[in-house]
Image (cartoon, rainbow, N blue to C red):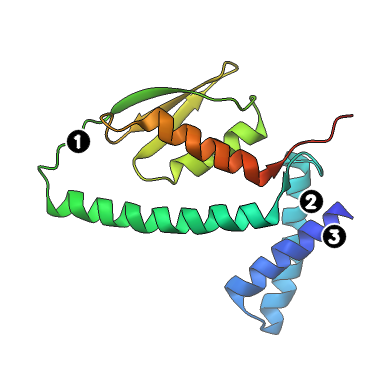
Amino acid sequence: MALLLRSAAYFLFWVVLAGTAAKDLAAGLVTAVIAAWLSLQLIPAGEMTLRPGRALSLFARFLWQSVVAGVTVARIVLTPRMPLRPGMVAYRTALPPGNRRFLFMTYASLLPGTLPTRTDETDLIEVHALDCGQPVAELLAEEEARLSAVLAERPSA
């Protein structure tokens, strides 16, 4: 059932991107099934479950932050003397090592001014920040809480 659901989701995404021409649908169906099978190997069914309403809210917030990031980059380009203090920040995460932490690191890499560079088996994530004068760790903690709210807790075995 998980393979069917993921295949359908990937196929729908394919149709949105590629359209409904017969050759595109055939390629999309094959690609969707392969992608679903591979995704089940990487993230087995039930390991991460999304809360759709919260995921939509997080997506909307992400789109807004993308606009803010674009404006920020434009300001930096147009004002080369903008005072920035780039550097590394050690961020202490509540997420255990594994897929949830990697998902957060991927999400954080898309936020304006942050780029997670590495993590290990401890609770630290090393983050390159564009401006260490900003409360980077606090902002990351807020985003981690938002992302965690999107992911339903794993049922206990």
Q: Along the polypeptide, which appears first: circle 2 or circle 1?
A: 2
Q: Is residue 114 above or below residue 118?
A: below
Q: Position of residue 118 (x, y in %)?
A: 48, 26
Residue placed under numbered mark 2 in the picture: 37
Residue placed under numbered mark 1 in the picture: 84
Give the camera-side residue of 135 and 89: 135
Q: Residue at x 44, y 46 (%)?
A: 110
State the residue lying farthest toward the bottom.
21
Give the camera-side residue of 149 and 22: 149
Answer few, some or many: residues within 10 Å of disc 3's Cα (few below 14, many 20 plus, some between 14 and 19).
Answer: few
Answer few, some or many: residues within 10 Å of disc 1's Cα (few below 14, many 20 plus, some between 14 and 19).
Answer: some
The amino acid at mark 1 is: Leu
| Quadrant housing residue 154 | top right
Q: Residue at x 15, y 37 (%)?
A: 83
Left or right of residue 120: residue 116? left
Q: Is residue 112 above or below residue 17?
A: above
Could you tell me which secondary element the residue under label 2 belongs to?
Answer: helix
Callout in the foreground (1, 3): 1
| Quadrant housing residue 109 | top left
Which of the labelled discs sits on residue 4, or is there none? 3
Left or right of residue 82: residue 154? right
The amino acid at mark 3 is: Leu
Q: Position of residue 37 (x, y in %)?
A: 79, 51
- Alpha-carbon distance for marks 1 and 3? 48 Å
Give the camera-side residue of 48 and 10: 48
- Alpha-carbon distance for marks 2 and 1? 44 Å
Could you tell me which secondary element the residue under label 3 belongs to?
Answer: helix
Residue 33 can be seen in this image: no
State the residue lying farthest toward the left.
81
